[in-house]
Image: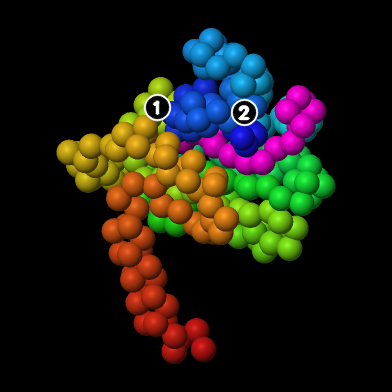
Amino acid sequence: MKTWFITGAGRGLGNVWTSAALGRGDRVAATARHLEDLEPLIDTYGDSILPLVLDVTDRPAVFAAVEQAAHHFGRLDIVVNNAGYGLFGMVEETTEEQARAQLETNLFGALWVTQAVLPIMRAQGDGRILQVSSIGGIAAFPSLGLYHASKWALEGLSESLAQEVAGLGIKVTIVEPGPYGTGWSGSSAVHTEPIPAYEPVRDARRAGAAGRAPDDPAATAQTILALADSTEPPLRLFLGSFPYAVAERVYRERLRTWEEGRALGS
């Protein structure tokens, strides 16, 4: 039996993974901004779930929640930094408030949770940290500039972290999902005020996404459980088939661009 700490457990992938962990007999400290989002899990799993109302942008509250979870369950084996949302809009359209809020949640929220759990895992001599990024953590698309900024930063932070804690029994995996049928681009999304000059870019983006059905979030459950159980987890893990073609195209283009500029940069 493992003990999990999962942020953003009230909906989307976080909810799927929380349910999967509880369903196999594990214990979960599940955080959400609204307690009612966790009530179906509380009703089903009782004492196996510790529901915690948490805004991950509140650093003192994060440390208090982690301490409460560790005290309640006695240890923390797997921490999943899943809380986050998408900010849709062009770079020029993004307000200061929107930009800061995106980074506060997607980047700093994960940082605060990571900092809070590391002393516990160091004392245990083991632990897993799953940092939920996105295919948008390695590739960029128009209208998601600040979202990409938050996820690219999370990936760099997590690569450094993995090297720093490798000798402490702590393993880090960057989880990079493709598009899934969650509320990420719907009810959970924030949108900028559109500038008409960018409508052709928006139209092209919509046309490119038309007809592409998102994957089923439930299909990720067994993968995440297997990842949590792996003795040698990978540093990176794509979820779904969509990210592979994107990654291959992006890295071919980057290598070609660097090679073309070799003489100029040398």
| The N terminus - image quarter | top right
Residue depicted at x 62% and y 28%: 27
Q: Which residues are magenta?
A: 68-92
Give the spatial CA distance, label 2 vs label 1: 25 Å
Callout 1: SS: loop
Q: Residues within 10 Å of mark 1 (few under 14, many from 20)?
A: some
Three-letter residue code for mark 2: Arg
Q: Which mark is residue 183?
A: 1
Which numbered disc, 2 or 1, marks the residue that appears first in the sequence?
A: 2
Say if the magenta span includes residue 70.
yes
Callout 2: SS: strand
Give the side of residue 136 with respect to residue 107, left or right.
left
60, 52: nearer the viewer? 52
Position in image of residue 2 (x %, y %): 62, 36
Residue depicted at x 41% and y 22%: 187
Q: Is residue 174 above or below residue 163?
A: above
Position in image of residue 84 (x %, y %): 53, 35
Give the side of residue 110 with respect to residue 190, left or right.
right
Q: Is residue 136 visible?
A: no
Three-letter residue code for mark 1: Gly
Residue depicted at x 52% and y 22%: 10
For this orientation, the residue located farthest to the left is: 211
Q: Is residue 156 above or below residue 51?
A: below
Residue depicted at x 71% and y 56%: 169
Q: Which mark is residue 27?
A: 2
Give the side of residue 234 with respect to residue 248, left or right.
right
Give the side of residue 222 with respect to residue 61, left or right.
left
Q: Is residue 120 visible?
A: yes
Position in image of residue 223 (x %, y %): 43, 44
Position in image of residue 168 (x %, y %): 75, 58
Q: Which mark is residue 128?
A: none
Quarter of the figure with residue 29: top right
